[in-house]
Amino acid sequence: MIVQISNYYKSLGPIETFAQIHRRAFSASVIKVNAEKIKSPEQAVTPVKPSSSAAKSKDSSTQDERSAAGTDWLLASEKEKYELGKRWLATMMGEDVEAFTDEKVAEAIRYLLPSHLFAKDARPIMKDPVQLFGQKKETQIGQDGRPFHAAFFTGQPAYHELIFKIWENLETLDEIEEEMQKFEGEEEAPIYYDKPLLVRWMKHYEMEEKLKCRLSQDQYDLLIRRLTRIAKHPQGEKMQEFLSEYQVELSQGGKKIEVAEIDEDGYATVMGYRKTAVAEVRLKEGSGKIMVNNMPMTKCFDNFLHRQQILYPFMVTDQLGRFDVDAGVIGGGQTGKAGAIRLGISRALLSFSQSFYQPLEDAGLLKRDARKVERKKPGRMKARRKFAWVKR
């Protein structure tokens, strides 16, 4: 029985692999196309192999053209590989090579190499090298064969260039600080600023997209530490334009946080909401006086917990007795009014200092409390309460 099976497989001949089948199909299609182009037997002339000197001159001319044009030879070689793979893919899918667009390439890759990975960047792709890598100056080679960027061979030229810029800016700030210390009687920097900038540093993946290179966790942490060092420098505001390139505006629920401007009288006016209550809160630096509907807070709110809710933003930021509040509130009950005023005070504090953001965010005071009384349902005593069920 075993001998018969072996003889059967021997009669089939050598088994071709998947790649061999498509290679044979591609070569057959090329031969067919070339045969169609030849109209008469006289045109079928055996090609003459060029001499070695002619080939060398042709290669040197192409290299000179590339160097003269200033193009990236690495990108050009990747482009040639992409075009070759695109022709192979079109032949495998039975499509016209000339009309095989990038969308059809993506469809073919999804069909031939299906993937259910959640991260789309981890799925197999085939794109034009210019789209993937871009025309980056640091990856270009000069006419002398040397890269333009000094850190080209590190594989992370943008990262090392950023490290160098950070140290340059730090030295500049230190020089400015030394010159400022020479003068006497200089006023101290103000604690509060008219227009705070609520931002955060770029995350790991955002920094990689910005620099267009892979970063390890240690490299990312090093960048953030050194950028933070510039931000915390006494003269760090002078480098805000440089720092803003690596910062992102904070947002809540897809919306950017809007910071109220301080008017001529020193007030920051913000709206607060809770249940059906709406409050207009005006905040300015003062002695800690709190007025609600033109009355002291103690007269409007008898419950100690409601007073504590109103003062909670000042307690979190350690600013008790440093701001005056003038609030007007309508609608809702005592709990809703206190919650609306609390939200307005929390958002108004952001107009005076950026440092207030983190403690207020950690305490959950910058988000509106969307909880409301659940409505009564038909056929029920209340929202959830049902009528007593009687068996008979």
Image (cartoon, rainbow, N blue to C red):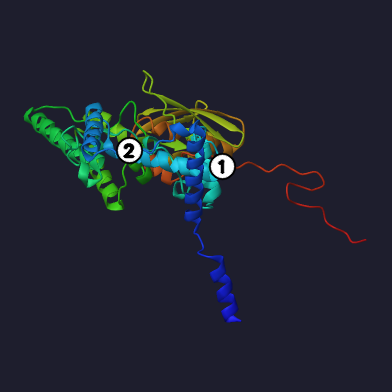
Q: Nearer the viewer, residue 17 or 381?
A: 17
Q: Quadrant of residue 45?
A: top left
Estimate the x, y position of residue 122 in percent, counting from the top left: 45, 50
- Is residue 233 visible in the rendered image? The answer is no
For the C terminus, the quadrant is bottom right
| Relative horizontal placement of residue 84, taking residue 374 as reference (left or right) | left
**As displayed, is residue 352 above or below residue 263?**
below
Mark 1 is surrounded, within 10 Å at the Cα level, by few (under 14), some (14 to 19) or many (20 or more) other residues, namely few
Q: Nearer the viewer, residue 2 or 50?
A: 50
Which element carries disc 2, helix, strand or loop? loop
| Relative horizontal placement of residue 54, taking residue 355 as reference (left or right) | left
**As displayed, is residue 183 above or below residue 49?**
above
Which element carries disc 1, helix, strand or loop? loop
**Pointers 1 and 2 in contact (C-beta within 8 Å):** no
Estimate the x, y position of residue 337 in percent, counting from the top left: 56, 35
For the N terminus, the quadrant is bottom right
Estimate the x, y position of residue 277 in percent, counting from the top left: 59, 33
Estimate the x, y position of residue 194 in percent, counting from the top left: 33, 26
| Relative horizontal placement of residue 193, taking residue 24 as reference (left or right) | left
The residue indicated by pointer 1 is: 94
The residue indicated by pointer 2 is: 48
